[in-house]
Image (cartoon, rainbow, N blue to C red):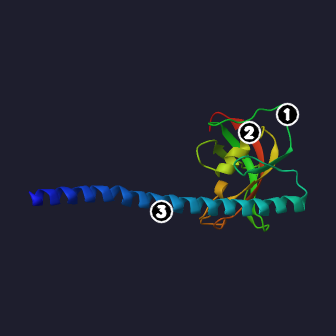
């Protein structure tokens, strides 16, 4: 009889301890996540300050959207259409680092075709192109989370780089 009581007590003790361990692990994970969120917010704030100072030095009239994309359409066309997800667009562009290093250039004589919404361009550039009208020229500044992130592009854009696009939306079509 004592053995049964001992087994029951041990069983209840074991079951009672498991949720507490799980709670401690959840608290640790939650604490780590909170720390990462805080660090990311600090990093985004620093990047925003760097971009803001860059824009002010050049006296550009740029706006920042809710994602952190900075944009300015400087050659407007009011009578043309805007692209939508799924459209094919032909673009000419130059991409620079903020230190003035030219990374990539595609001219209007051989524009690049992009399928909007299908991940074949940086998410920030995809978003910016959708704000433009056919024939317009704009500049975008993409913080790392909208460009090439923590790793860069393994070629000309280093890790955690802020990039500047000078872009022209040459043509919109529904076919490649």
Return the residue at label 2.
171
Quadrant for the N terminus in the image = bottom left
Q: Residues within 10 Å of mark 2 (few under 14, many from 20)?
A: some
- Residue sitting at x 75%, y 62%: 96
User: Residue 91 appears at what percent x and percent y?
Assistant: 73, 46
User: Residue 58 appears at what percent x and percent y?
Assistant: 89, 60
Q: Residues within 10 Å of mark 3 (few under 14, many from 20)?
A: few
Q: Left of 78 or right of it: where is 122?
A: left
Quadrant for the C terminus in the image = top right
Q: Separation of disc 2 and disc 3 at Cα?
A: 52 Å
Q: Regarding mark 1 in the picture, which secondary structure is present there?
A: loop
Query: Is the Cβ of the residue at disc 2 closer than 8 Å to that at disc 3?
Result: no
Query: Is the Cβ of the residue at disc 3 closer than 8 Å to that at disc 1?
Result: no
Return the residue at label 1.
78
The dot on residue 28 is: 3
Q: Please name whichever residue, 64 or 4, is drawn nearer the observer in this view of the structure.
A: 4
> Going from the N terminus, do you reach mark 2 or mark 3 first?
3
Q: Regarding mark 2 in the picture, which secondary structure is present there?
A: strand
> Going from the N terminus, do you reach mark 3 or mark 1 first?
3
Q: Please name whichever residue, 13 or 51, is drawn nearer the observer in this view of the structure.
A: 13
Looking at the image, is 84 positioned above or below residue 10? above
User: In the image as oriented, which residue stretches furthest toward the left?
Assistant: 1
User: Residue 97 appears at what percent x and percent y?
Assistant: 74, 64
Q: Nearer the viewer, mark 2 or mark 3?
A: 3
- Residue sitting at x 71%, y 48%: 111
- Residue sitting at x 57%, y 59%: 34
Query: Is the Cβ of the residue at disc 1 closer than 8 Å to that at disc 2?
Result: no
The dot on residue 134 is: none
């Amino acid at each position: 009889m004592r053995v049964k009581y001992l087994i029951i007590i041990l069983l209840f003790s074991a079951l009672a301890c498991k949720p507490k361990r799980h709670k401690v692990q959840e608290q640790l994970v939650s604490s780590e996540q909170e720390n990462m969120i805080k660090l990311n917010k600090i990093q985004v704030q620093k990047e925003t300050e760097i971009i803001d100072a860059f824009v002010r030095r050049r006296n550009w009239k740029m706006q920042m959207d809710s994602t952190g994309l900075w944009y300015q359409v400087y050659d407007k066309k009011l009578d043309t259409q805007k692209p939508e997800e799924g459209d094919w667009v032909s673009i000419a562009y130059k991409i620079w680092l903020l230190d003035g290093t030219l990374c990539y250039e595609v001219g209007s004589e051989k524009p690049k075709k992009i399928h909007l919404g299908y991940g074949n361009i940086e998410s920030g550039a995809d978003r910016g192109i959708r704000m433009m009208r056919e024939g317009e020229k704009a500049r975008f500044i993409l913080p790392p989370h909208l460009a090439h992130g923590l790793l860069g592009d393994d070629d000309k854009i280093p890790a955690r780089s802020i990039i500047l696009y000078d872009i022209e939306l040459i043509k919109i079509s529904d076919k490649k």
